Image (cartoon, rainbow, N blue to C red):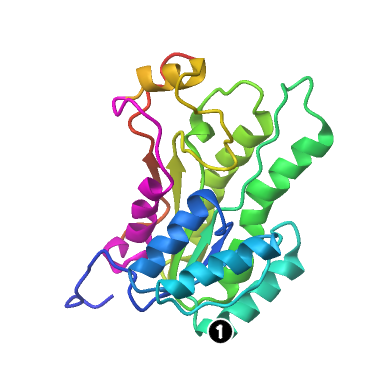
Amino acid sequence: MSETATQTVSVADKSAVVIGGTSGIGRAIALAFADDGADVVATSRDENAVEDAAAELRDRGAETTEVTCDVREMDSIERLYDEASTALGEIDVLVNSAGSVGRGSVTEMSMDDWELDIDTNLTGVFRACQVFGREMDEGSIINISSMSAGQAREERPAYCAAKSGVNGLTRAAAADLGPEIRVNAIEPGFVVTPLAGDAFEEGTDLRAQIDDRTPMERVAEPDEIAGAAVYLASDAASFTTGEMITVDGSYDNSSL
């Protein structure tokens, strides 16, 4: 950026692709981008969800296109880039928010569940960073990690391992793709999303434990994570790369 450029927290006039952008945190990010004046492609494997997200993006004034994507398939990601760039022009921002959460202890988790989590949450991010990193001239890649990357979580071995890997990949990609492309990650805490199901409902023992250990005394809504993505995608973050921004209400993980 030039020394005289105005650095503002805005994505107006940028073109963004949000993988996993049809539900949860990814959808909140896609809509926040659109509300701020960006053109956005929100994608996932679900064709109906892609259509619904595209309709809502258009209602908010964004240019978009409807294209599904499976991060477990390189061809699918390459097609996503081609169709998104044809519709929007040069892509400025990529958000990797596709997710899978398999359950089971280290001794009980099936290999199928392990491989699904690793392939979706980690290798899928690598594939997308590779495809878009080759094609983007400059801009921002934002990987959705998790505070679980640094936690001991029962019955989440693949998820914790994958998110730890996302953080390492983020740092390595920032080194490889800079200075033209900045690469950062967001580590959300406990967020009410379809993937979480009813796990964080008020009145449950888990919710009470979370509230007791969180200064904000609650869990987050997806749109409370979106602000960090707007910042990282904006020119205000022009010197921010290789970073993990934690948005967890200062959850206390000192007691495992």
How many numbered discs sit on the rendered protein? 1
Tell me where residue 74 appears, x and y as whole percent: 74, 65
What's drawn in magenta, residue-wise? 215-238
Tell me where residue 230 appears, x and y as whole percent: 35, 60
Give the farthest residue toward the right. Answer: 111
Q: Quadrant of residue 66?
A: bottom right
183 in relation to 1, above or below: above
Give the farthest residue toward the left. Answer: 4
Q: Residue at x 75, y 44 (%)?
A: 116
Q: Quadrant of residue 126?
A: bottom right
* Residue of label 1: 87
Q: Nearer the viewer, residue 66 or 1?
A: 66
Q: Residues within 10 Å of mark 1 (few under 14, many from 20)?
A: some
Q: Secondary structure at mark 1?
A: helix
Residue 183 at least partly seen:
no
Tell me where residue 200 appears, x and y as whole percent: 50, 28
Q: Nearer the viewer, residue 14 or 208?
A: 208
Tell me where residue 20 appears, x and y as whole percent: 59, 56
Is residue 233 in the magenta section? yes
> Is residue 239 found left or right of 208 in the rendered image?
left
> Is residue 234 found left or right of 39 in the rendered image?
left
251 in relation to 4, above or below: above
Q: Residue at x 46, y 22 (%)?
A: 207
Q: Amino acid at mark 1?
A: Ala
Residue 154 at least partly seen:
yes
Q: Residue at x 36, y 28 (%)?
A: 218
Is residue 70 in the magenta section? no
Quadrant where the N terminus is found in the figure: bottom left
